[in-house]
Image (cartoon, helix red, strand yellow):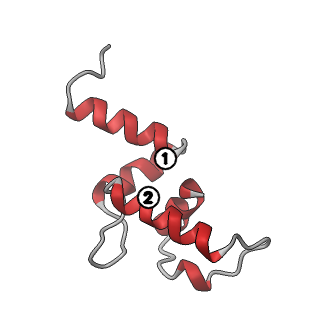
Amino acid sequence: MTTPLLQLKSLGIDNIMKFEWVSAPSSEAIIRGLERLVRSGMVNEADGRLSEVGAKVAELGVDVGIASMLWKSKEMRCSEE
């Protein structure tokens, strides 16, 4: 659920709870996804907007978990391995 939420945020849709889904996920799933994005630093906790890292991850077009791992490897200087 985090990848579609991140994509919506990157498109400027900040109020995801009011987004008109074709097949709407549960509110609980949306909240858990948003919490995961906040914990991973892709969404700012203060205002709920996409962070700089979140914007870069959204451009990759891969699963949020994989993208997060790639960015962390860069920070820890182990991306060559």
- What is the three-letter code of the residue carrying label 1? Val
Residue lying farthest front?
Answer: 28
Q: Position of residue 52 (x, y in %)?
A: 29, 58
Q: How many marks?
A: 2
Q: Quadrant of residue 36?
A: bottom left
Q: What is the crowding at mark 2: few (fewer than 14 residues within 10 Å), some, or many (at least 20)?
A: some
Q: Is residue 80 left or right of residue 35?
A: left
Q: Given this view, does label 1 or label 2 mark the residue nearer the observer? A: 2
Q: Position of residue 44 (x, y in %)?
A: 30, 68
| Residue 25 drawn above or below residue 81 | below
Q: Which residue is mark 1?
A: 64
Q: In the displayed orientation, state which residue is furthest to the right.
A: 23
As measured in the structure, the alpha-carbon distance from the residue carrying label 1 to the one carrying label 2 is 10 Å
The residue that appears at 31% across and 62% down in the rendered structure is 51
Q: Which residue is mark 2?
A: 36
- Badge 1 or badge 2: first in the primary sequence: 2
Q: Point out residue 24 in the picture as x, y percentages from the top left corner.
A: 73, 73
Which residue is depicted at the point 46% across and 49% down? Answer: 59
Name the amino acid, label 2: Arg
Q: Are marks 1 and 2 in contact (CB under 8 Å)?
A: yes
Residue at image coords 54%, 57%? 2
Residue 78 pos. (x, y %): 25, 21
Question: Considering the image in quadrants, where does the C terminus appear?
Answer: top left
